[in-house]
Amino acid sequence: MSGLAGHTAAAFDSAFNAAPLELDQYADRRTAIYINTTRNISMPIVVGPRSARLLAPEGIALAFRSIAVFVDPSPAGEARTSYAVRMACRHGAHLIGIFAVPPTWGDSPAESFVRGQQAVRRVIASHQSSEAAATDAANRSFSAGCARENISFEFRHFRQDGVDDSAALNSLHTDLVIVGGPRAGGLPRDWSAEALLLATGVPFLLLPEPWTGSTAEHVVVAWNASREARRAIADALPLLVGALSVTILVVDPQKNPRHGAEPGADVAHYLTRHGARVVVEQVQSHAEPIAKIILAYAERRNADLVVVGAYSHARTAEMIFGGVTRSLLRDAVVPLLIAH
């Protein structure tokens, strides 16, 4: 890891014991960040009064103002609603419940043989009644969850077999979209969370099913000094500032010159000035898949959210995610916030 690899253990320990890494040179300093390396050594980074004044005043922080959640009248959908309600309540946000009405056509092959105007009308009326009942059930489930916390909310619905981009349109003007995982629960069956992200640019939070844990209290940020990771931090900033702890996880830092002399320190400084409580962890993959390292670390530390920037590249006319992103989407067992 650059900045550390050139020291022997003795020299490093001596330097560490001599003085912490400082943000500015003033008296009455207070500890803000710790950098933990693979040798399990903590290096305090201290913030002087000048930097401390840059921290957000207590009780004043960035917040999401509009959150969307894709819902359905199932146990997983109710758990998703409950999570979104807690998130909206914490941020004082307006919550939008979006229900993609599943089509009922094609469930009965016998309907293909219906003849006569009256018979066709009865079939159409039956399907309309089924769709209306499903919409009403989703509305009641969502509204009940919101009413218990007395938050601002609204319910929207659209038919899955529509030819428009209703899923993207209803997500476009929000700060965060919450969907179920790993198969994007609540979304229309011809949409994926990845497609929604690429279509709207709105970050999405993939909630594993089932998830009964806390709501973004202990957050891990997968940091590789890329544009995508930086975008993810910007999109997740309200969550990072409000979390009890934030870990900047740097995997194989020595392989990436973009990190600079002290991998993770600069982004930790940035977040600290916003008021986040930050720790930097530098770990080695030992040739294991990066996604596996990130998820194993999050589970080991009981994290309740992983923030990651989605790398994508074009394949002919289609945008596809890189291997690490796809693996995280497939294997995540903790909530995953992805931005692009």
Image (tube, rainbow, N blue to C red):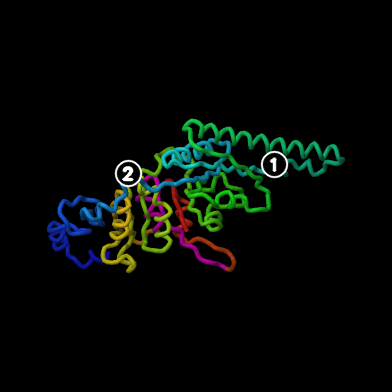
Residue hosting label 2: 244
Amino acid residing under circle 2:
Leu
**Residues at marks 2 and 1, CA–CA distance in whole angstroms:** 45 Å
Expressed as whole percent of the image width and height from the top left, the position of residue 86 reads 44, 38
Expressed as whole percent of the image width and height from the top left, the position of residue 294 reads 38, 54
Q: Which mark is residue 257?
A: none
Could you tell me which residue is drawn at 48 percent across and 48 percent down?
A: 206
Left or right of 241: which side holds 167?
right
Span shown in magenta: 290-315
Amino acid residing under circle 1:
Thr
Left or right of 11: which side holds 218?
right
Mark 2: give few (<14), some (14-19) or many (20+) Cα within 10 Å: some
Q: Quadrant of residue 304?
A: top left
Q: Quadrant of residue 261?
A: bottom left
Residue hosting label 1: 104
Residue 12 in the image: above or below residue 182: below
Whether the residues at callouts 2 and 1 have beta carbons within 8 Å, the answer is no
Expressed as whole percent of the image width and height from the top left, the position of residue 218 reads 35, 45
Left or right of 47: which side holds 137?
right
- The quadrant of the rendering that contains the N terminus is bottom left
Q: At numbered mark 2, what does the secondary structure look like: helix, strand or loop?
A: loop
Question: Which of the pair 61/171 is nearer the observer?
Answer: 61
Residue 41 visible: no
Question: Which of the pair 109/145 is nearer the observer?
Answer: 145
Expressed as whole percent of the image width and height from the top left, the position of residue 263 reads 29, 62
Question: Which of the pair 55/85 is nearer the observer?
Answer: 55
Residue 313 in the image: above or below residue 158: below
